[in-house]
Amino acid sequence: MRFDTVIRNGTVVTASDTFKCDVGILDGRIAALAAELSNADEIIDAKGLYVMPGGIDSHVHLDQPSGEGIVMADDFDSGTRSAAIGGNSTVLTFCMQEKGQSLREALKIYHAKAAERCHVNVSFHLVITDPTPEVLGQELPALVADGYTSIKIFMTYDGLRLQDNEILATLDTARRTGALVMVHCENEEAIRYLIGRHEAEGRFEPKYHATTRPIAAEREATHRALSFAEIVDTPIVIVHVSNREAMEEIRRARGRGQKIAGETCPQYLMLTADDLDANAMDGAKYVCSPPPRDKESQDACWEGIEQNVFDLFSSDHCPFRFDDPEGKLNDKGKRSFRWIPNGIPGVATRLPILFSEGVMKGRIDINRFVALSSTNHAKLYGLYPRKGTISVGADADIALWDPNKVVTLTNSLLQHGADYTPFEGLEVRGWPVQLFLRGKSVVESCTFTSAEPAGQYIHRGRSSLLSQTAQGVA
Ligand code: URP
Ligand code: ZN
Ligand code: ZN
């Protein structure tokens, strides 16, 4: 058999196995996994390298409206560029419904934003902020059938959060239509109350972002979301979990037999609330929600990674420039933490951090790394087995990793639109030295080798979590 490309002498890693073999690629797909493949137009020598499925980051915000006068630092061009630098071949971003807008209108806008500019594959989660009877009764079922099979809802943020009855109605519709719902769990009423109290007491600095969003507010909302999911009998994903108490809620729900996926992110392993308490306004760089907590919470999140509480390790990349009137240091943001846009950049640093801090420091094995960074995202969001694994028939979305390459993270390396990285100066061991999209080399040693953006929009199937649940009409 003749191949377009053969990757020779590497160590192939999947979520379950590690083996030495060559990878034969034909017409963008993996066509053979065998020893001594040689009949190819191009031979890549991967000696000393891991051959892994390209990363799938299922929690990435790009080009979203973020409040008056605030501009997200990445569009689909720069955000997917940065994703590719960090070893990702697919990102799942958000299509945000504005109040009063139909989901189809929102999709038209986001497809236009993404068209022909994506350096990795892209697929959209639908953010529902206005769950009218038309949206839930007519639009959503049709869109799920068209391959928009996941939804995000918010329990916090003015203008975005749903009321409890709306959460129940959305979850119930998701169950009937076969969509998976991601839930941002923080109690908005408690946060509003605490923000009011802090401001009345003259406490305005960035560090108060953390004290106004305490663990109890995340724990309570997590418990409520899980209870609602139980009541309407549907699986959910609890996204960006930051601490042990929220984690325990997931454990307990699973103990009751609920189908729940849990996600955590690099910021909850590497940052703490002390980072928000930096000199002058520097703490604004680390403002995200839920906020980073403390050392005990970091240890808890590692435990959740090691003990399978978490299925997903995502970046929650939500980039704003720091020193910019349209970013973190906007006029109002300088006056109060309440107006500092929430979110940090991280799509390029997610995988090197997990590889270095997780695999190289012996906390997780390399197969768990693949599961957390790619395979589980593909399974939970309806991309598997086309994406997220190295197997015959899968798309040849492949990352070659050098486990011995030592890199010091610095902003200029990451090619995103933000003017900082929260992980500046962190030394990581292990780096994605080459990335292939459907067999085409797109990045080599942080340099783009493909002249045109090679990413595609992907319509998705049903989540593996839903196929384990009886479907039916309420
Ligand atoms: O602070 C964060 N996480 N911003 C992104 C939006 C979200 O809640 O995921
Ligand atoms: Zn969120
Ligand atoms: Zn997010």
Image: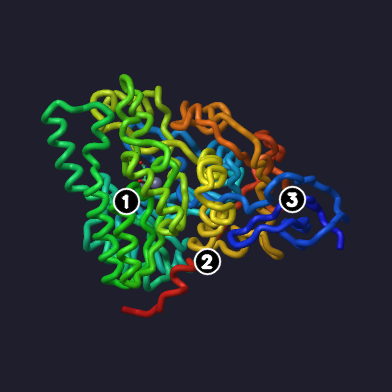
Q: Quadrant of residue 117?
A: top right
Tag 3: residue type? Answer: Gly
Which residue, given by chain and number where applicable, does mark 3 sit on?
Answer: 10
Q: How many marks?
A: 3
Position of residue 302 measured from the top left corner of the image (x, y, whole percent): 42, 48
Q: Is residue 122 visible?
A: no
Q: Position of residue 461 (x, y in %)?
A: 52, 66
In the image, is 304 to the left or to the right of 80? left
Give the amino acid at mark 1: Arg
Q: CA distance from mark 1 to mark 2?
A: 32 Å
Distance of label 3 from label 1 (alpha carbons): 38 Å
Q: Is residue 305 visible?
A: yes
User: Residue 385 is drawn in which quadrant?
Assistant: bottom right
Q: Which quarter of the figure is the C terminus placed in?
A: bottom left
- Mark 3: give few (<14), some (14-19) or many (20+) Cα within 10 Å: many
- Image mark for residue 374: none
Residue in the foreground of this view, choosing between 157 and 270: 270
Q: Are marks 3 and 1 in contact (CB under 8 Å)?
A: no
Please indicate whether residue 317 sits to the left or right of residue 348 in the image: left
Q: Residue at x 66, y 59 (%)?
A: 390
| Residue at the limit of the structure toward the top, as seen here | 280
Scheme of colours in the image = rainbow
Residue pointed to by mark 1: 244
- Asked whether mark 3 and ligand 3 are closer than 8 Å, the reply comes as no
Crowding at dot 2, Cα within 10 Å, few <14 / some 14-19 / many 20+, comes out as many
Local secondary structure at mark 3: loop
